[in-house]
Amino acid sequence: MNLFINRITIFLLSSLVAGYAVSKEECYYNPDAVNYEYFLKHTNFTNAQWDSKKKEAKIILDKENEEIIVSYSACYQFGLTATYKMKRSAEKLNSVFLIKKLTWLGNKVLNKPDYEMLETALNNKRFINDLDQIETKERVFIGIEGSDYQSFLVYVVNDKDDFYVEISWYM
């Protein structure tokens, strides 16, 4: 639960800071360092639609309107959020499918030590909520322990029409 509270705190602080214009000189991390080349170097994707203003890559997959959005934040904090969006369906609302998608996404966007931490958490079923109950819950959180990040979370979002698996870390 502490990871969830940390995630909310970071989000609120980031939102507060985002409301103010910040010059690059005031940033702890260089926002210009995050670009398409950085994305290609730090993920296992070979092409994407890059939005330099949002610092975000969009990868359209060939199946059923599925897409992946990888975004970075760089100023007071440095972070990554990778979201795999897919159409909601009954066969996707089970832990075996979700673990497979989270593992695949983690392999695409995380470095080896982070991926191994994710894999260990998934294999050991370290879920804050029961992953098999995603059909009745809006979100399921999986806390990743043992990292050097302020927050390293994975979660599954059960939306009205869409379904998301997301990996996020901040330092």
Image (cartoon, rainbow, N blue to C red):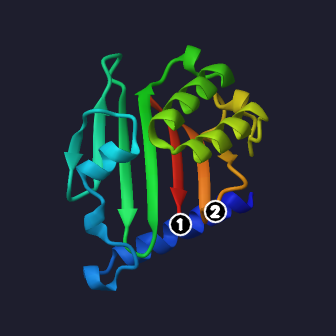
Query: For mark 1, does the 10 Å Cα neighbourhood hold few (<14), some (14 to 19), or many (20 or more) residues?
Result: some
- Identify residue type, mark 2: Asp
Residue at image position (33%, 76%) is 19
What is the number of the mark on residue 97? none
| Rendered location of residue 87, percent (x, y) | 42, 24
Q: Work out how far the residue at label 2 is from the one at label 1, CA to CA, in angstroms.
A: 8 Å
| Rendered location of residue 71, percent (x, y) | 36, 51
For marks 2 and 1 on the same chain, the one whose residue lies earlier in the sequence: 2
Residue at image position (37%, 56%) is 72
Q: Nearer the viewer, residue 53 or 112?
A: 112
Element carrying mark 1? loop
Residue 119 falls in image quadrant:
top right
Q: Which residue in the structure is indicated by mark 2?
A: 148
The reply to whether residue 21 is visible in this rendering is no
The reply to whether residue 60 is visible in this rendering is yes
Q: Nearer the viewer, residue 40 or 27?
A: 40
Left or right placement of residue 162 versus residue 124 in this view: left
**Is 48 placed above or below 144 here?**
above
| Rendered location of residue 100, percent (x, y) | 59, 24
| Rendered location of residue 150, percent (x, y) | 61, 66
Q: Nearer the viewer, residue 94 or 161?
A: 94
Q: Which residue in the structure is indicated by mark 1?
A: 171
Left or right placement of residue 155 versus residue 89 in this view: right
Residues at circles 2 and 1 in contact by the CB criterion of under 8 Å? yes
